[in-house]
Amino acid sequence: MRSRVKLLERALAVELLVLIPVVAHAQLSAPLTRVTTGDVVTTPAWYWTGTWGDYDEDGYLDLFLGAASAPRNYLYHNQHDGTFALVDASVMPRVPASQHGACWGDYDNDGHVDLIVSAGNPGPGDPPDSVFHNALYHNNGDGTFTPLTTGAIADETYVAGFHAPNWIDYDNDGFLDLFLAGHAPFNRLFHNNRDGSFSKIAHHPLVDFVDVTEGSAWFDVNNDGRPDLVVPRSGPNPPAVYWNEGGGAFSLHGGFDVQDVVQTAVADYDNNGFLDVVFHPNLSGGSVQLFRNNGDATFTHVTTSGILPTLPPGYWLASFTWGDYDNDGFLDAFAGLGCYPPPPNNNGACDAGRGLLYHNNGDGTFTAVTEGDLVTTPLHEPLSASWGDYDNDGFLDLIVPDGGFWPTQPTSQLFHNDGNANAWLAVELVGTVSNRSGIGARIRVHATYRGAPRWQMRAVMGTNGGAAQSTSLRANFGLADATAIDTVRVEWPSGIVQELHGVAPRQFLTITEPNCAGEQTGCLTAQRSALWLKHVSDDTKDKLRWGWRKGQTTTLSDFGVPTGTTAYTLCIYSGTSSALAYTIPGGANWTAIGHEGFRYRDKTAANDGIRRIVLKSGADGKSTALVTGIGVNLPDPTLPFTLPVTAQLVTSSTNVCFTSDINAAKKNTMTLFKAKAP
């Protein structure tokens, strides 16, 4: 029986390959194996969305699948052995909804990721007059969830279909707000009141237009440090681009010469440091619309990438998501095709959907993968797809929820990545000044691989790629043959820039935001200090030197244990704003100086990065602290500074910090700051 099923699947896949044009320079096979056992792939339902999130903080990604006309929620706990257990229905009581979209995010900053599930519109098994609510599930921190049944978000009921929920801190107050797109007459915007409740924002540019959409993307379009919003629009309308002007204000702009699109997915596919944009064509026909970010708030329409050049009649692009499946350092693309309308109402034009996978060639073009389970397994209506490394082997796996308005209930498809020898890095953020989930942050990684030094960038996003988070909140980087990572740089929503150097690949790295959003009080104050910063166009000649001398009495215990886990962050404030943050991790680069202090030396950063730190205690009040660095890996300050300037060295494991206040400068230009105090 199994062989007959396999033969049928392969025959159907061949038929679909004939129908759907692909650009294939050579036969490629993807090491993604279809999982055929377990509740995730054997429980039939009209699935719409799926998203990965570690709801119990055990270090393994769990899975939520959203389904219409279902009697319960489908929340699966990761068992740490490659399998999942369907949790009891009482763990997350279902709120009446068609569950067209879902998104994880810690909206109350309590350290536990919560889940928003959108109402959707009635499914095949629902009465047309069904009343559906958006469901916000609060994570109680004990493995259970409480649905919020009152308040602005829950009070919104089905009008014409709420689809993609999207978390973002649009006003940068450290708490996640919620944008909700859909078929309703207006989009919805909910502001976080910072007390566990939300307020609906009315008569606002983000909600005051009438159009059908099923997705949105928040990212910094114009590079001013604030999250902007891109909303695809159906009909004879281009996507709406809203620039965040600060203070909750937005202005409408254009930028994309395309019409009648309903979903979007963004990623830096060419590794130029800026997020590029894909739009889904509306319903049947059309093609993928790819726009390359030029880095100056403009985009170039790319028509020769090789990604899904055309769609045959009867098919539509149901989902699209970016992910580096082979860890070669370049993002690949998955596209899920469905039938519109579904059978039997399409006169036989489309009998089944399928998945398409495009391998990034590293030169701005893509090659269609033609072999492997991911591209030969028949699908139905794959309305979302999400990458996530569920078995912690460093390689991205893929969940493809399947169902939608298909006449019968299919099952979802899970594909396990069998991996290869390539290196990788997984980064998870913990915000302290920014929102706890780090949504809105950009993570950059610099390493040498494939014969050249290269940067990559990932954005931590609420929703991306339609109605779900197309990747988990954990950012994955493929590193090919890299043996070391020069720099990991985090650009937090708060404006803090944090860098780590000499990071080992093949690890899961948690980065906590340094608290450089406001000067700390109660610090040890220098009697004498000096600060010298040089920043020129040739970053290799950048220099940093900060000295703190003859402060109050300190003891060895004040320094924590930098040879172990105590990290230090150097915070420099220009006026009242954070101008620079640099984190120095604890570990092997630290050595003890007898019984009086510690010394940090990074031999790999001798000519690039923080290269020396000396901390000495002194019972006679002659304590000293010194930080020096050089080269391109230093964070770039925005000069000239606004006086007064404050420099603080803050520890991660003690309550002691060291501060120097500078009220006058010998030099304060666009390239040099030089000062002593007093």
Image: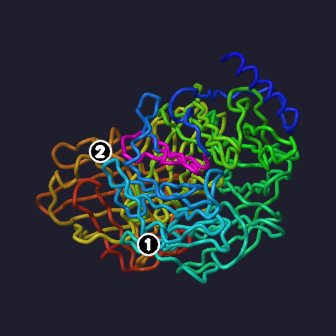
User: Does residue 444 appear in this view?
Assistant: yes
- Which quarter of the figure is the C terminus placed in? bottom left
On the image, the x and y values in percent for residue 167 come to 52, 62
Q: What residue type is disc 1 on?
A: Gly
Tell me the amino acid under the disc marked 2.
Thr
Q: What span is in magenta? A: 47-74
Q: Distance between the residues labelled 2 and 1?
A: 43 Å
Residue 151 got which mark? 1
- Earlier-in-chain disc, 2 versus 1: 1
Q: Residues within 10 Å of mark 1 (few under 14, many from 20)?
A: some
Q: What element carries label 2?
A: loop
Estimate the x, y position of residue 652 in percent, counting from the top left: 29, 55
Under tag 1, what secondary structure? loop
Seen from the viewer's position, the closer of residues 138 and 348 is: 348
In the image, residue 299 lies at what x, y percent?
76, 62
Name the residue: 22% across, 56% down.
654
Q: Does the magenta stretch include residue 13?
A: no
Residue 543 can be seen in this image: no
Q: Residue at x 47, y 29 (%)?
A: 82
Quadrant in the picture for residue 258: bottom right
Quarter where residue 196 is shown? bottom left
431 with respect to 620 (left or right): right
On residue 565, which mark appears? 2
What percent of the width, then of the height, locates residue 234?
Answer: 77, 65
The type of colouring in the image is rainbow
